[in-house]
Amino acid sequence: MFLSPKTVNFWNIAIPNEMIFKFLTEDEVSEVFFIGGKKYSKQTEVYKKRYSIVSSGDKSVSFSFPKDGSLSWNNNNFLGVWKNTQIKGEIINTEMSIEDYFRHSFPSNKIKHTGQEVSEGLGGSFWTEKTIISEKEGKQFQHILCKTTKGDTSYVITITTSENISSRAHFILFNILQTFYWKE
C-alpha cells in the first residue's frame, strides 16, 4: 500500500515494513530504504565500470572487488591488493578469536592497540569486527578484521595498510562485506 508517491507500506506477515524509494528520474528507482533496516541500491554504470564480482574456483566464495586491484585465490581463501591496501580472506576454526587469528596471521607484528569489538549485519551475514594497530620493524600498520560464522567454521576478511585507514579502505571493506557470498 502506497502512503505517498515515494513511500510504501510493505505487507509481510513476518515483518511489516515501510519503504522509501529514491528516484534517479521521475520513473527510475535508484535505491530502496527499509525504515529502520537495510538499503538496496541499484548498481550505477560508474560502479559497474569500477567493480566486478570475483569468485573462488568452485564458486563457493564471491564478492565485489575493484577492477584495478589484484586478487589471487587458493581454494576458498584469497589475497588481494588495492591502492596500498592488502585484503585477505580465509576460512578458520570458529573457536579462534579475532585476536588469536591476528597473531597467527601476523606473527612478526606486535599489537600496539586493539579497538572495541563490534557486530553488524551486512549482505546477509552477521559480522564481528575489530581494529588492531600493530608494529613490525618500526613501522605501524592498521588492520580491520571481520569474522562471520557458519556452523563450526568461520570466514575472516582482513584489511591491512601502513597508512591511516582511509575512507577508500572502509568503502572497499563495506563493499566486500555487503556483497559477500559464502556457501559452506
Image (cartoon, rainbow, N blue to C red):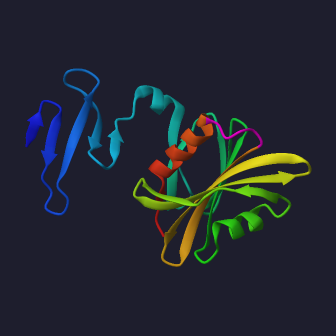
Dominant secondary structure (helix, strand or loop) of the stretch shown in magenta: loop
Q: Nearer the viewer, residue 52 or 43?
A: 43
- Residue 59 can be seen, yes or no: no
Image side of residue 156 versus residue 106, left or right: left
Q: Quadrant of residue 154?
A: bottom right
- Asked whether 153 or 15 is in front, the reply is 15
Q: Is residue 13 above or below residue 150?
A: above
Q: Which residues are magenta?
A: 162-166
Which residue is at a point 10% across and 37% down the rendered structure image? Answer: 3
Give the x, y percent position of residue 6: 18, 32
- Residue 58 lies, with reference to residue 18, above or below; the image says below
User: Does residue 142 belong to the magenta stretch?
Assistant: no
Q: Residue at x 33, y 42 (%)?
A: 40
Q: Quadrant of residue 93?
A: bottom right
Return the x and y of residue 77 as percentages of the image width and height. 63, 61
Q: Quadrant of the N terminus?
A: top left
Q: In the image as oriented, which residue stretches furthest toward the top? A: 25
Asked if one can make out residue 48 in the rendered structure from this viewpoint, the answer is yes
Using the image as rendered, state which of residue 41 and residue 68 is in the foreground. Answer: 41
Locate residue 35, reporting x and y percent.
Answer: 26, 45
Judged left or right of residue 151, residue 145 is right
Residue 26 x %, y %: 20, 21
